[in-house]
Image (cartoon, rainbow, N blue to C red):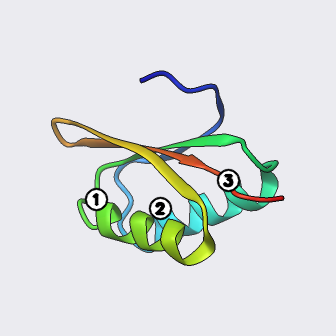
Amino acid sequence: MSYSVKNTVDAQGLICPEPVMMLHTAVRDANAGDVIEVKATDPTTKRDIQQFCDFLGHKLLELKEEESLLLFYIQKSGA
């Protein structure tokens, strides 16, 4: 699926919690409804980003796995 990505967080090579902290900054700077792409290589980000979205009410639209690269598409919630 294709998304209109407003911001990309490149967290390749970083280990948690850094990818989630970078995502948190990107979400804070985004508008409600914006889609943020996260590129990560740490397998624990699958769990951590899902928990981040669940806890803060953002929507994990999709997770793609391409060999060792994880691509997350997160839509910022908001009213």
- For the point 71% across and 41% down, which residue is it? 34
Compared with residue 1, is residue 14 higher up or lower down, i.e. above or below? below
Q: Amino acid at mark 3?
A: Lys
Considering only order in the chain, which callout, 2 or 3, is on the residue closer to the N terminus? Answer: 2
State how many labels appear: 3
3D distance between C-alphas at marks 1 and 2: 9 Å
Q: In the rendering, at what x and y percent does residue 74 appear?
A: 54, 48
3D distance between C-alphas at marks 3 and 2: 16 Å
> Which circle marks residue 19 in the picture?
2
Q: Say few, some or many: other residues with alpha carbon within 10 Å of mark 3 (under 14 / 14 to 19 / 20 or more).
A: many
Considering only order in the chain, which callout, 1 or 3, is on the residue closer to the N terminus? Answer: 1
33 on left or right of 14: right
Could you say which is closer to the camera, residue 11 or residue 1?
Answer: 1
Q: Amino acid at mark 1?
A: Asp
Could you say which is closer to the camera, residue 9 or residue 71?
Answer: 71
Quadrant assignment, res 46: bottom left
Quadrant assignment, res 62: top left
Residue labelled with disc 1: 42
Q: In the rendering, at what x and y percent does residue 32 appear?
A: 78, 50
- For the point 50% across and 71% down, which residue is it? 54
Describe the element under mark 1 as helix, strand or loop: loop
- For the point 43% across and 73% down, which residue is it? 51
Could you say which is closer to the camera, residue 28 or residue 79?
Answer: 79
Q: Quadrant of the C terminus?
A: bottom right
Compared with residue 37, is residue 44 higher up or lower down, i.e. above or below? below
Q: In the rendering, at what x and y percent does residue 5 appear?
A: 62, 31
Residue labelled with disc 3: 76
Q: Amino acid at mark 2?
A: Pro
- For the point 34% across and 52% down, which residue is it? 13
3D distance between C-alphas at marks 3 and 1: 22 Å
